[in-house]
């Protein structure tokens, strides 16, 4: 009976876990990302409101 056993592959079965292999040099906290998004939104609003007068586009 011991010869009838089926061996299963290991649990990772050739899958690569990239987050273990690579660490980015640039890491941003979520608070910094939210701040940058708000800053970009404010710049867009300001340019839509006053951009034509500042840059002389008519």
Image (cartoon, helix red, strand yellow):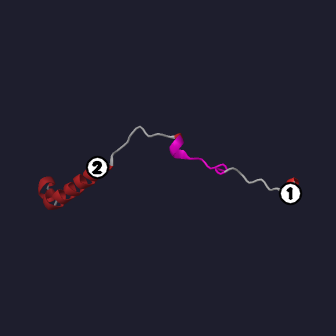
**Mark 1 Cα-neighbour bin, 10 Å: few <14, some 14–19, many ≥20:** few
Which residue is disc 2 drawn over?
31
Q: Residue at x 54, y 45 (%)?
A: 18
Q: Residue at x 41, y 37 (%)?
A: 25
Residue 35 image offset from top left, x and y in percent: 25, 51
In the depicted view, which residue is nearer to us: 47 or 53?
47
Q: CA distance from mark 2 to mark 1?
A: 57 Å
In the depicted view, which residue is nearer to us: 11 or 2?
2
Residue 49 image offset from top left, x and y in percent: 14, 61
In the picture provided, is 52 more to the left or to the right than 10?
left
In the picture provided, is 5 more to the left or to the right than 23?
right
Asked if the residue at tag 1 contacts the one at tag 2, i.e. Cβ–Cβ closer than 8 Å, the answer is: no
What segment is highlighted magenta in the picture? 11-20
Which dot, 2 or 1, sits closer to the camera?
1
Spot the residue most to the front.
Answer: 1
Q: Main secondary structure of the magenta part?
A: loop
Quick check: is 18 in the magenta stretch? yes
Mark earlier in primary sequence (2, 1): 1
Which residue is disc 1 drawn over?
4
In the depicted view, which residue is nearer to us: 37 or 31?
31
Q: Residue at x 28, y 53 (%)?
A: 34
Residue 28 image offset from top left, x and y in percent: 34, 44
Task: Please tell me how many numbered marks the rendered image carries.
Answer: 2
In the depicted view, which residue is nearer to us: 2 or 54?
2
């Amino acid at each position: 009976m011991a010869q009838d056993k089926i061996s299963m592959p290991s649990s990772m079965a050739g899958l690569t876990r990239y987050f273990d292999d690579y660490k980015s040099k640039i890491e941003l906290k979520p608070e910094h990302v939210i701040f940058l998004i708000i800053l970009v939104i404010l710049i867009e609003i300001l340019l839509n409101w006053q951009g034509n007068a500042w840059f002389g586009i008519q």
